[in-house]
Structure formats: structure tokens, C-alpha cells
Image (spheres, rainbow, N blue to C red):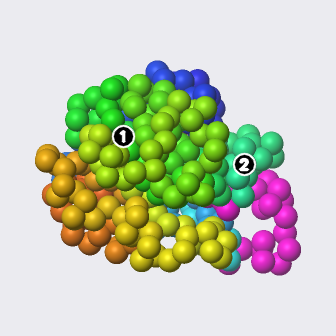
Amino acid sequence: MLKDKHLLKLEDYPKEDIQNIIETAFTFREVLDRPIKKVPSLKGITVVNLFFENSTRTRISFELAQKRLSADTVNFSAPTSSLKKGESFKDTAQNIEAMKIDAVVMRHPTPGAPKHLTDFIDAVVINAGDGTHEHPTQAILDMMSLKEKFGYIKGLNVGIIGDINHSRVARSNIYGLVTMGANVTLCGPPNLIPDNIINLGVKVNYNIDEVIEWADAVNVLRIQRERMGIGIIPSEREYRTLFGVTEERLARRGNELVIMHPGPMNRGVEIDDRVADSDQAIILDQVLNGVASRMSILYLLLGSKEEG
Ligand code: CP
């Protein structure tokens, strides 16, 4: 039902498949509003969640999506596995597949690790975030949330604010939004925006006030302390002063700006408390749409397998 067997990235991903995933996600969103939030769509399918890196939203969201679709779901945690005894990534993956599983949802700190996994196993692989490379399911849920809010994506002005260099969320959003016809402007410290990024069809503006004035929605990125070297930003206080999405900045704009954040948030750094908790923030809608988007992706990648 989708062109690719796996979902590894949104770079070069077909527009019609993104549209299909988002439209199908809205039908699953209705399921999530029912008293009994479960459908039999993936009964008999087994999915392993293979997380080598911390996660709250993505892991729970995938697990919930699998349960809502009646799939059997198994969670793998690297710190308590035989990887700790020296077993290789390849052996771990092949042993898991030998147990007759249908799909692997994988988060890994190394860019390209989910693609590498497809060399060892036949199961469907879904990238749940690979280092600084991509986080395709996050971008799908972000686009679904924009579609829900505005009714369309094409022609929307979307600002992505923060540490673009280290952000897999930014990269997948850029690919997805440009494919869907949105206008994308990136904003952040110059040393955290790659030089050649405009080749991806986006603009760069280092003035956050201009971006806030121009945008219909902004996606505010987390300052990724764990991926940054020392001295990349002078201080969190200075970052907030120059690039923080604050109440004062939003007040200078006449009408409401839609605020998004993939989480986890650094409140008081890239986003102020009152902005994050305001009515113009759709951050928790993004989380709910994450379950519906992942149901859609799992269904479209695995649904025909169950029927066949
Ligand atoms: N947005 C996101 O990927 O959050 P987690 O790291 O909590 O999964």
C-alpha cells in the first residue's frame, strides 16, 4: 500500500504516500476518540520495539499504536539485553527475527542504523529516530497536526527554530514539508544551521522576530545538550535571549501563532512555560496525533501482510 517496504526517511519519499499516511491517520484518530479504542487491523502481526536510545513519546506512542491495532508487541531494551555481554548488533537483530516477527521499530544513536538493519533481516523496519539523521514518524505527526489545525499544508509558512544541525526532527520536517508544498524558514544560531541547507528548498533567517512575524506556525526544537560539544552555545540564558520563543516576542505579533514542539522541552530555554502551556500551543495534540500517525504507518506497511 506504500511504495517502500520500510519507512527509513522522508528524503525522496513519495508525496502521495505522505498524503495517504496522513489521510489514513485521521481515520485512526477517530478510533482514538471512541470508548473502546481498538481495531483488529493487525491481529496476528508481531512488532518488536528496538530502542537503543532513550525515548518517552515515540516508544509509548508506537507501543500504544500497536496495541490499538491488536498487534502483538515486544519491547527490547538495549541496557538489559545480551548486547551488554558483547553480542553484535547483527546477531541481536537476526536472533530477534528468527523468532518470527513481522516488523521492527528502531531508535538508535547512529545515523543510518535502521537502514543497516534492513541488510540483516527481512522484517519491515521503521525508523523511530537515528542519531542526527531523520525522525520520519515525528515529521508525519507534525504535518498531520498542521493539517488538523489549518486544513491544508501546501502554502503554509512554517518556521523551524533552534538547533537544526543536530536535529533529526528538523531534517525530516524539511523533507516532508517541502514535498507537501509548505514554505519553510529555518532560524537559529548560525553555527547550528548547516551552510548548504538552502539546497533542500528552505530559507534561512537568523532574526527570530521576523520569522515569528512571517510564520503561520513554528516548530520549536529542543536544545540537544547530549549531542553538543562544549561551547557551541555560550549559555542557555543567552540562547533564550536570542532565540527563545517567549511571551514578549509573541505579544509583538498581532495575531496568534501556532506553536509546536516535538518534546522533550527545555522550558525556559527554547520555549517559555507560558507559551508551552498556552492555547496557541498544539504540543499535546501532536502527541495524540503521534499515536494515530503511527497506527496509520503500521497499518499501511503491515496491513496487507495480515490479509495475505
Ligand atoms: N519527539 C520525540 O522523539 O520524543 P522522545 O525522544 O521522547 O521519543
Question: Is residue 158 shown left or right of residue 174?
Answer: left
The answer to which of 244 and 31 lies nearer the viewer is 244
* Residue 128 spot, x, y in % from top left: 56, 53
Q: Nearer the viewer, residue 133 or 141?
A: 133
Q: Is residue 90 above or below residue 139?
A: below
The label number, if any, that marks residue 112 in the structure image: 2
| Residue 122 appears in the figure | yes
Viewer-side residue, 292 vs 138 = 138
Q: Secondary structure at mark 1?
A: strand
The kind of secondary structure element at disc 2 is loop
Amino acid type of disc 2? Gly
Residue 176 visible in image: no
Residue at 51% across / 48% down in the picture? 170
Q: CA distance from mark 1 to mark 2?
A: 27 Å
Quadrant where the C terminus sits is top right
Residue range (magenta)? 80-109
Looking at marks 1 and 2 on the same chain, the residue that comes earlier in the sequence is marked by 2
Question: Residue 167 bears which disc, if any?
Answer: none
Quarter of the image where one finds residue 250: bottom left
Q: Is residue 82 magenta?
A: yes
- Residue 266 location (% of width, % of height): 41, 72
User: Residue 232 lies in what quarter of the image?
Assistant: bottom right
